[in-house]
C-alpha cells in the first residue's frame, strides 16, 4: 500500500498552496488547436476542433466544474477523450466529472491500476460513492496509443519508471507541442520522484533525453507544473538532473551518507522554486533512487 499512500500524499501536498488561492482556471492558447489550462493541480492541455475535444489531465476533483467552464469558453465542441499522464489525483481527480461530461478516460495500464487501488481503498474506508468508480479509465494501453482527431495525430507514449511507473508523454505531432506530465517540473518546485510507485531518477533522465531527441527549437513543451517551456528550457532541465544525479552518485561511491551529500549542496546554483518539494528532499529522492530504496515521502 506504500505507493497508494504516496499517491494520496502527492495530491494533498499541493492542497495548501491551492487552498491559499481560489480555484480559478486560466488558459493560454498555443495555436488554433492546443490550449493550456492552469490553476490548482497539474497543467491541462486541451486539443479542440470539430471532431471533439481531447483533454490531457483534469486536475483535482474539486476543480472539475471550473475546468469545464474554462473549456466552454474555448470551444463548443463535445468532450471526447481525457488522457491521464499518471495516477496522481492532481492530474486525474476530476475523471468522474469528465466522464459525466462525455469524456472517455484513457491511461497507461499501471496508472489505471493505481487509480483503481486508490478508489478501492477509499471504498474500504466507506469514503467512496458509487460514482467515484467513474474515476477509473475506460481504456488502458501498454506502450503507445494514437488518436486521430481534428486533423492531427496525437501520440501517447509510455515512459518507463520515470515520475511513476505509469507515466505518459503526449505528442501533438502537427502542432509540434509535447505534454510531459510530471516528468517535467518547470521552476515552481523541485521534481517529485514517486519511488514507491516505480519512479526513478534514471527513468526521468531517460524520458527527458528521449523527448529532446525527438524535438527541436520549434517545439513547445508543456510541463506538469509551471509555465510553458521551450526546447532550451527542457535541455537545461536535463542537464540539471544529470549534474545532480552524478553528484549524488559520486557521494554514494565515496561512502557518504545522505546528510553529508545534502550538506555538499549538489543542487546549489539552480534557480528552482522551493515549492512543495525542497532541494534537500529532492536530493533524498535521488539518493534513495540510486540505492534502490522506495521508502520516501516528499514531506
Image (tube, helix red, strand yellow):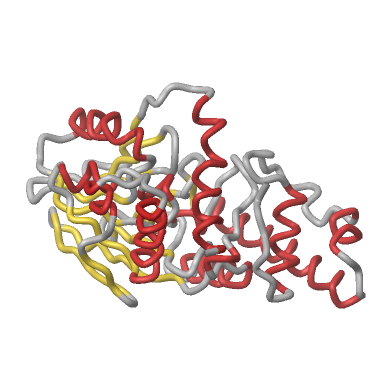
- The x, y position of residue 19, in whole percent, is 50, 26
Please indicate, yes or no, whether residue 47 appears anywhere in the rendered image: no
Residue 193 higher or lower than 108, as above or below: above
Q: Residue furthest left?
A: 50
Residue found 21% across the figure and 51% down from its top: 54
Q: Total marks drawn? A: 0
Residue found 74% across the figure and 75% down from its top: 291
Please indicate, yes or no, whether residue 216 appears anywhere in the rendered image: yes
Q: Nearer the viewer, residue 94 or 25?
A: 94
Q: Is residue 42 left or right of residue 194?
A: left
- The x, y position of residue 198, in whole percent, is 54, 70
Q: Residue 241's quadrant in the figure?
A: bottom right
Q: Nearer the viewer, residue 158 or 12?
A: 12
Residue found 60% across the figure and 65% down from its top: 195
Residue found 64% across the figure and 39% down from its top: 275
- The x, y position of residue 61, in whole percent, is 34, 39
Q: Residue 62's quadrant in the figure?
A: top left
Q: Is residue 189 left or right of residue 221?
A: right
Residue 95 higher or lower than 144, as above or below: above
Q: Is residue 106 left or right of residue 119?
A: left
Amino acid at each position: 500500500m506504500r505507493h497508494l499512500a504516496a499517491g494520496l500524499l502527492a495530491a494533498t501536498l499541493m492542497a495548501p498552496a491551492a487552498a491559499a488561492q481560489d480555484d480559478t482556471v486560466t488558459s493560454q492558447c498555443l495555436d488554433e488547436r492546443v490550449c493550456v489550462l492552469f490553476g490548482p493541480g497539474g497543467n491541462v492541455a486541451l486539443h479542440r476542433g470539430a471532431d471533439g475535444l481531447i483533454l490531457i489531465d483534469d486536475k483535482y476533483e474539486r476543480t472539475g466544474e471550473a475546468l469545464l467552464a474554462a473549456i466552454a469558453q474555448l470551444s463548443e465542441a463535445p468532450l471526447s477523450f481525457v488522457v491521464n499522464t499518471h495516477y496522481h489525483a492532481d492530474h486525474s481527480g476530476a475523471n468522474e466529472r469528465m466522464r459525466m461530461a462525455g469524456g472517455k478516460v484513457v491511461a497507461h495500464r499501471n496508472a489505471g491500476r493505481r487509480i483503481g487501488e486508490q478508489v478501492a481503498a477509499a471504498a474500504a474506508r466507506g469514503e467512496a460513492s458509487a460514482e467515484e468508480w467513474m474515476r477509473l479509465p475506460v481504456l488502458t494501453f501498454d506502450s503507445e496509443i494514437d488518436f486521430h482527431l481534428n486533423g492531427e495525430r496525437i501520440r501517447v507514449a509510455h515512459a518507463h519508471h520515470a515520475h511513476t511507473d505509469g507515466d505518459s508523454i503526449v505528442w501533438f505531432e502537427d502542432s509540434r507541442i509535447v505534454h510531459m506530465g510530471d516528468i517535467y517540473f518547470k521552476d515552481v518546485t523541485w521534481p517529485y520522484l514517486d519511488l514507491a510507485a516505480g519512479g526513478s531518477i534514471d527513468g526521468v533522465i531517460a524520458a527527458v533525453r528521449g523527448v529532446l531527441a525527438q524535438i527541436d527549437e520549434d517545439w513547445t513543451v508543456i510541463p506538469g507544473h509551471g509555465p510553458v517551456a521551450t526546447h532550451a528550457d527542457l535541455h537545461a532541465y536535463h542537464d540539471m538532473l544529470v549534474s545532480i544525479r552524478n553528484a549524488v552518485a559520486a557521494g554514494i561511491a565515496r561512502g557518504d551518507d545522505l546528510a553529508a551529500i545534502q550538506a555538499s549542496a549538489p543542487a546549489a546554483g539552480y534557480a528552482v522554486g522551493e515549492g512543495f518539494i525542497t532541494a534537500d528532499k529532492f536530493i533524498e529522492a535521488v539518493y534513495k533512487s540510486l540505492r534502490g530504496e522506495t521508502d520516501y515521502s516528499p514531506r
